[in-house]
Amino acid sequence: MIQIKKISDKLKRILFLALIISAFSLLGTSEAKAGSEHNVYGWAWSENIGWISFSPAGSYPETPNYSAYADLPGLGQICPGGAAGDYKVCGWARACSVFNSGCSGTLNTNRGDWDGWIKLYNISIDTTSNPAQFHNWAWGGNTDNDTMKSVIGWVSFNCAEGGNCGTYNYKVVTTLSISVDGVCGTATTPPTIYVYDGSTTPISTNLCLAGTPPSTNPILPAAAGSTVTWICRGLNGGSDVNNCTATRIANRPPQILNGANTKDYCAVGQGAGYEYFGWNYADPDNNPELRFQFQADNNSDFSSLEINNDVTGLSNPNGTYNSQSAIVSLTPTIGQIAFNTAYYYWRVKVYDNQGADSGWYYGGTTTTPPGASFKTASHPWPTPAFNFSPSTPLINKVVSFTESSVCYDANNNSQPCSAIGTTTYLWTFGDGSICDSGADINCKGNVSHTYTSSGTYAVTLKVCDDLRCCSITNNVPVKTSEGVPGWSEISPF
């Protein structure tokens, strides 16, 4: 509730008798409600101009393009010139007297130049006072701020702005519980934060060292979403009498960021491949990850799961990258998926250690099903393979390379890669020499090579079919000679 504190009978300014934040109203069912982008609604009364609505409908005379709004931490809307969560109130109110009836509809022709708009000029809420006080001004008049055209002119919310609290001690204050973002203690005098959970004994202490209290929920031995109270001893470096309280926000659910799917059909072996899935665990309260679920299906409604993994017992810090892989097979078993399938769908759900979950993220990026699909390859990629002889070659001697690479046609039938006309071979012998079937057809299949220096050479065979290229590398040790035969002296006697 917003209330006026110590109003003088001589005060001639308009003071707001009822300004309601979030979920309370003095007027019962007759209150004016705001949309989801607003969190201030209700009414004020002026003996000069009557009722004033704090949630009038637009269009508004100028920016900001919304009715009265309190920028509390975590709500997202930012007042012009302000920062997120800086406890400012901005937007528009409107006098109802400019209408023929009620607080909307046809304007009264006797209203003069004024359309009833009252602009809130970055009114701030001082959370270091108890109760929290409003500061700064509202303007009631034409939007060019011409005092000759004003109707009610400037409206003060606190006598401190005029420096006249000694004569007219008035303030607009709120007893609504709000998060404490004021300075708690000083850099040289750290405060102690006590957290109570419906008892007289604190369940946690020393939650901050100095400066601002934690902006995210500390991990407390209270149930997720429970209401606890922060009491900051030594607010702004003061004594224990300067306490501030705040109601803990319910634990916020974790999120999934940077979801992505990639594939690699070269890494598994003949006739198989991998689909990879990854995402980042993100928790707004910095809670660790306890569990995740991963599912994949060729039905967009996930009614016949090919993959259904539930990974538990985790203790991953906020920001951890999670991954899962799925084997793609010509004859898939449980937990595998098939080649040549046009549509597969995947989704993931993460859980924090407070019991909250993200809900399903489809395709790793959206909470709207079914998300982006992925397609498996029409057939397995090449599986290159080769050996060489002799096993320990000598310099200036021929080394024979015998390949046994396997490829697949459009019907998923396997055959030697060299027997398929469209395949290409590239041999790299490790000494700067290559053999490319694109330039020499004799390089497609078995080849030979002679080394002129000793050493270990990394020999790579890359085979490409109509889909992709895959490679394999073997090390070939080349020696200078076969060595000198062993001998020993034999006595003739």
Image (cartoon, grey):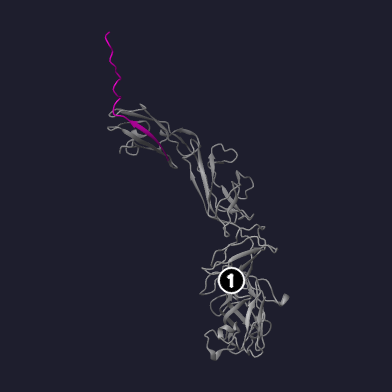
130, 115: nearer the viewer? 130
- Looking at the picture, does residue 210 appear above or below residue 259? below
Q: Residue drawn 52% across and 73% down?
A: 82
Task: Note whether residue 103 is visible.
Answer: no
| SS at mark 1 in the image | loop
Task: Note whether residue 458 is visible.
Answer: yes
- The magenta segment is 470-493
Indicate the quadrant where residue 164 lies: bottom right
8, 262: nearer the viewer? 8
Image quarter hosting the C terminus: top left
> How many marks overall?
1
- Looking at the picture, does residue 428 appear above or below residue 77? above
Indicate the quadrant where residue 334 lies: top right
Q: Residue drawn 54% across and 84% down?
A: 143
Q: Is residue 121 magenta?
A: no
Relative image position of residue 2 (x, y in whole percent): 66, 77
The residue singled out by tag 1 in the image is 235
Q: Is residue 261 left or right of residue 295?
A: left
Relative image position of residue 46 (x, y in whole percent): 66, 86
- Looking at the picture, does residue 314 appear above or below residue 153? above
- Label 1 Cα crowd, 10 Å radius (few <14 / some 14-19 / many 20+): many
Q: Is residue 414 left or right of residue 309?
A: left
At label 1, the amino acid type is Leu
Please identify the dominant SS of the magenta region: loop
Q: Residue drawn 68% across and 62% down?
A: 201
Seen as rendered, the residue at the extreme right is: 28
Relative image position of residue 297 (x, y in whole percent): 59, 46
